[in-house]
């Protein structure tokens, strides 16, 4: 299945990444989901673009105006972490990440999104003090 798309992952990511902060929340959420799927298809390519992806993913998780974007951002974050195999590294590379996830867990009104947040925290794993 996914191997058929692997040669196209770099071009697809190239096309999608600049639009991740699109003003249309539904489009932005769907593009985030595309990024997660592409990361599962080729984790290496996603890892190479992590510094371009993470600000948009974190902004989506932070987005107070769109539950759709928050959920898609968390799902994508989990997929990126699984696909790139960098379990604890995101906390070092993105020092605001742990606080963002814990804050989302505490403030999120949606049970589904809180569960997604817990899942992402589990995927990313524990942090050494």
Image (cartoon, grey):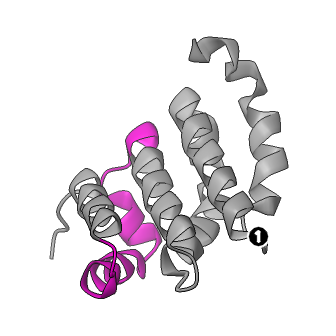
Q: Secondary structure under badge 1?
A: loop
Q: Find the magenta span and give its range.
A: 82-110
Q: Residue at x 34, y 80 (%)?
A: 104
The residue closer to the viewer here, 79 or 89, is: 79
Left/right placement of residue 117 relative to residue 90 reads left
**Residue 111 in picture, x, y percent from top left:** 27, 69
Q: Could you tell me which quadrant the C terminus lies in?
A: bottom left
Q: Residue at x 44, y 45 (%)?
A: 79
Q: Residue at x 62, y 62 (%)?
A: 51
Image height check: is 80 above or below 57?
above
**Residue 34 in picture, x, y percent from top left:** 64, 43
**Residue 96 in picture, x, y percent from top left:** 42, 82
**Residue 4 in picture, x, y percent from top left:** 68, 12
- What kind of secondary structure does the magenta stretch mostly adopt? helix
Q: Could you tell me which quadrant the N terminus lies in?
A: top right
Q: Which picture quadrant has residue 99?
A: bottom left
Image height check: is 112 above or below 108?
above
Q: Which residue is mark 1?
A: 24
Q: Does the magenta segment cover residue 102? A: yes
């Amino acid at each position: 299945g996914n191997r058929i798309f692997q040669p196209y992952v770099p071009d697809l990511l190239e096309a999608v990444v600049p639009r991740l902060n699109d003003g249309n929340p539904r489009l932005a959420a769907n593009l985030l989901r595309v990024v997660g799927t592409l990361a599962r298809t080729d984790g290496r390519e996603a890892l190479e673009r992590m510094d371009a992806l993470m600000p948009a993913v974190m902004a989506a998780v932070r987005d107070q105006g769109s539950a759709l974007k928050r959920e898609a951002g968390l799902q994508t974050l989990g997929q990126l972490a699984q696909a790139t195999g960098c379990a604890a590294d995101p906390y070092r590379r993105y020092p605001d990440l742990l606080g963002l996830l814990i804050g989302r867990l505490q403030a999120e009104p949606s049970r589904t999104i809180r569960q997604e947040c817990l899942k992402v925290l589990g995927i990313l794993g524990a942090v050494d003090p």
